[in-house]
Amino acid sequence: MTRQHPPYETASPPRWRRLKLGIGVAAACLLGTTLLPSCSLGYVLSSGYYQAELLASRRPIDKVLAEGGLGVGQEQRLRMIPEIKAYGKGLGLSATQNYDTIAEGWDRTIWNLSACAPLSFEPATWWFPVVGRVPYLGYFKEEDARRRETELLGEGYDVHLRTAGAYSTLGWFRDPVLPGMLRWTEADLSETVFHELAHATLWVPGSVMFNESFANYVGETAVERYLVDRYGPGNDALATLQRTNRDGARFEALLHQLYKDLDTVYRDTTIADVEKAARKTALYASLESRVLTAGFEDPVPYVNSIRRSGWNNARLMQFQVYNTNQAAFDAVLARNGGDLKKFIDDIGTITRGARDPFAALETAASATAIGADVQNP
């Protein structure tokens, strides 16, 4: 899910940490015909102001490059973006006008806030016109995010507040490259662009979790192909990415298991809430030891990350949003011979009109597995 250590705590965004809907929902509220109660007027006005400020700072990438003035590394990264977009188009991803500009001189930090019930994985959600119900909010000012964090804590929620490196209004506006993105590795930068192109290519209404998991899968698949085609098999960038991904996959497996262990406790009606809270504490405390015994190639960054900022239901729930049913996506890609364009088209067909896109995906994956068994008895 990400390309740099330490995991989940870097300027480069892990797969599930990229902020897309959090700010985009403010645009939806502003453009909606009715301001509903879920769209706090203060939130909408504040987000709208800073969003307008961001969009006003956009300048075409080609003009910024022609004028010079960027550092060598920044210029190199900025030149890559049109190439990455062109490569994505060749894989079947929709060409958009996102990332054709850069928010020159814009130096604000974007904050992402999520909340979850303390003894269940029931997230706090907010409803906005067009995009529907989302499990997080985006802020342009830390004090605003901290204020809402305090309110949610006072209401008894587990809360997770973090910074976000990427930004999208989901098609409302032509989103710019943020200056901080030019400090990322090429793998992180290209995966983010592919992720956003995936959203532009396929969006299933009403399912944030499915859309983020799908875009993550596409981004991860595309970035490896991009590095191979750009630098050849076995290049250093690809080797670093794959090494990071191996430990990332181990950590994801641990988090999925932790989620299952906690969910089992939360759903057990024979356990009193006091005992559930005690078991919850013990299970979260076990994460470090799980990492140390899981055979990581380099466990230190993960351990340091856990020690710096602990996990709670809000943080684990957000991880789930970005990392669900990857094995089913694997099965659908395999049945399309590894062709990413056919895979995307197939996912569109599978989910079209489905009330539950994950259920539809699992059905398709199961049918694929059964077909493979028939062909290879």
Image (cartoon, rainbow, N blue to C red):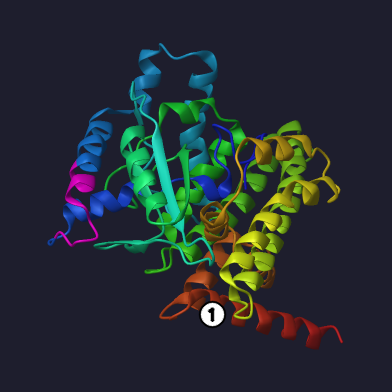
Amino acid type of the residue tagged 1 in the rendering: Ala
Q: Secondary structure at mark 1?
A: helix
Q: Is residue 52 above or below residue 294?
A: above
- At x 43%, y 54%, the residue is 94
| Residue 346 drawn at (x, y percent) | 54, 72
Residue pictured at 52% horizontal, 26% vertical: 77
Percent from the top left, x then y, of residue 108? 35, 28
Q: Nearer the viewer, residue 141 or 188?
A: 141
Residue 93 shows up from this direction: yes
The foreground one among 3 and 7 is: 7
| Quadrant where the image shows the C terminus | bottom right
Magenta run includes residue 39: yes
Question: Within the image, what quadrant is residue 240 found in?
Answer: top right
- Residue pointed to by mark 1: 360
Check if residue 124 falls in the magenta segment.
no
Specify the segment rendered in magenta: 35-45
Q: Residues within 10 Å of mark 1 (few under 14, many from 20)?
A: some
Whether residue 52 sits left or right of residue 286 in the image: it is left
The residue under the point 64% across, 66% down is 275
The location of residue 331, given as percent across then percent down, is 68, 71
Residue 230: image x %, image y %? 65, 37
Residue 337, can we see it? Answer: no
